[in-house]
Image (cartoon, grey):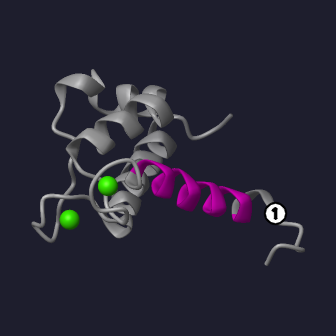
Amino acid sequence: MCEMNPTPLEQTIFTLCKVFSEHAEAEGNKDTLNKNEVKKLVKTELPHLFKAAQGDPEGQTLLMDFDGDGEMNFKEFMVVLSCLACIFKAHCPKK
Ligand SMILES: [Ca+2]
Ligand SMILES: [Ca+2]
C-alpha cells in the first residue's frame, strides 16, 4: 500500500479515512465521533460545503446517528459526506 502512486480519487478516500480518524481519536471512543468531535470536524474540514448545504453549521444538530448509539461511526460519516456531495453536484454540476 505504501509504495503505490495513488490516483486523485484514491487519495481522496485515504484523506477521508485520515480526517475521520484524527477527529474521532480526540475524545472518548477513538472509532466514533461524539457531538463535540462532529462539530469540530464540520467547522474545520467542511465549513463551505456544510454552510452551503444547511446554513450556519453551529446552529445545526449535526449528529447523523442511524444506529442510535449517540455517536457517529465511519459509515454514518460517509452517509453525511455522500449527501453533501450529492447536494454539491446538484447545485454546481459543472466547473
Ligand atoms: Ca471519539
Ligand atoms: Ca451511531
Three-letter residue code for mark 1: Thr
Q: Residue at x 39, y 47 (%)?
A: 26
Residue furthest left as drawn:
68
Q: Residue at x 43, y 50 (%)?
A: 86
**Residue 17 painted magenta:** yes
Describe residue 79's horizontal placement relative to residue 36 as left or right.
Answer: right
Label 1: state its secondary structure: loop
x%, y% of residue 4? 88, 73
Q: Quadrant of residue 32?
A: bottom left
Residue furthest bottom as drawn:
1
Main secondary-structure element of the magenta-colored stretch: helix
Quadrant of the rendered image holding ligand 2: bottom left
Q: Quadrant of the C terminus?
A: top right
Q: Residue at x 20, y 48 (%)?
A: 63
User: Which residue is denoted by mark 1 in the rendering?
Assistant: 7
x%, y% of residue 42? 38, 36
x%, y% of residue 59? 18, 24
Describe residue 14's horizontal placement relative to residue 72 as left or right.
Answer: right
Q: Quadrant of residue 1?
A: bottom right
Q: Quadrant of residue 65?
A: bottom left
Residue 88 seen in the current view: yes
Q: Tell me: residue 38, above or below residue 58.
A: below
Which residues are drawn in magenta? 10-23
